[in-house]
Image (cartoon, grey):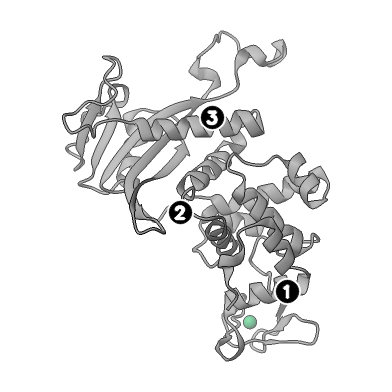
Amino acid sequence: MIDFSKFNSLFSIASYFSTDDVCKQTIIERRWGKDESQDVVCPYCGKHHCKMSKSGRFHCTACNKNFSCTVGTIFENTKITLRKWFMAMYLISSHKKGISSHQLARDIEVTQKTAWYMLQKVRSLFAQDDSTALEGEVEWDEVYIGGKEKWKHQSMRTPNTQGRSTKTKTPVFGMMERTEFVNENGETEFMSNVRAMVVEKTDRSTLEPIISQFIEEGSIVFTDELNAYNHLAEMGYVHKICNHGALQFVCDDDGSVYTNNIEGFWSHFRRMISGCYHDVSDEHLQQYIDEACFRWNTRKMSESERFTDMFNTSIGLVKPNKEFKLCIAA
Ligand SMILES: [Zn+2]
């Protein structure tokens, strides 16, 4: 099997993936194994052990269909060389604050329009996995994201809004699990995993179903006084409130009651938007949130681990979720 741990720089990616054939071989090996262990499964009828035809495509004797190794991946039917796709995935995953389509276009020598399309496809790999829940100690908080009215042209402004009106902003709800991991030196480090989403409102009836879906019962939840809910104990949580209004930022004897981690994520998210993408429409906001969550949750990984993670998702090894399926169908 190809050792992905060597892919820790753009140079190593460009050197190893020197032709599209090498890229295809890598996809085949990661999807279906190598040599005797290889088992190519037909994506249409599920028959095992499909054989490669002379053209380099696979043929299924059960349903008589031909398919390529990129079927069902973000690279399906692409006209762009796989070498550029792999480099793009590396660049997009390794730029901590995101990369613009103009920059990506220059780096891999494609048009800005193509780079924008590639960014959208790669971003679909960042979609959050809905099947897992956070547990233990969890902080949560909401923010309002939106265009600043004063920068807009007169004709684009929303009537009767000044400054911080929520009429022109979209609420985003974020939850963050405090956890830890063991680094390469065998030391235990603090770590946090975030999950965030656009919500319609920040009222109880909107947020409670989200909370019960994504936070395990029995968890200890930390909020500020603004989003204090009175029914969390009934829902099976231990609720601790940090009173920012009273300038209490760490509000407990043992120092554990605070929401600083999730607030750190929001400032990271805002920097990503203002520094790289300037302003985002509501239509694409969830995608940018997904991207920010991916960057946050993988920030302690090495470059090669992050690339491996993206590569596996791109070829469908990691359980694809709704957004990913939509992207394949598009
Ligand atoms: Zn078949």
Q: Is residue 21 above or below residue 162?
A: below
Q: Which residue, given by chain and number where applicable, does mark 3 sit on?
A: 270
Q: What element carries label 3?
A: helix
Mark 2, other Cα within 10 Å: few <14 / some 14–19 / many ≥20: some
Identify which amino acid the numbered label 2 is placed on. Asp
User: Which of disc 1 and disc 3 is earlier in sequence?
Assistant: 1
x, y percent for residue 222: 27, 34
Residue type at mark 3 is Arg
Instruction: State the residue at coordinates (57%, 81%).
Output: 33
Q: Residues within 10 Å of mark 1 (few under 14, many from 20)?
A: some
Q: Tell me the residue at 62%/45% (across/down).
A: 95
- Can you say which quadrant of the picture contains the N terminus? bottom right
Q: Which amino acid does label 1 sit on?
A: Val
At 73% from the left and 74% from the top, the residue drawn is: 22
Find residue 22 and name its label. Answer: 1
Q: Which x, y percent locates residue 245? A: 29, 15
The one nearer the camera, 63 or 252, is: 252
Name the residue carrying label 2: 129
Corner quadrant of residue 201: top left
Count of number-bearing discs: 3
Horizontal relation, residue 15 to residue 218: left or right: right
Quarter holding the C terminus is: bottom right
Q: Is residue 55 left or right of residue 91?
A: right
Sequence order check: which comes first, mark 2 or mark 3?
Answer: 2
Foreground label between 2 and 1: 1
User: Could you tell me if residue 199 is visible in this image?
Assistant: no
* Crowd band around label 3 with a 10 angstrom C-alpha radius: few (<14), some (14–19), many (20+): some
Q: Which residue is drawn at 56% across and 8% down?
A: 160
Q: Is residue 64 above or below residue 183?
A: below
Give how far apart the Cα atoms at labels 3 and 1 are.
39 Å
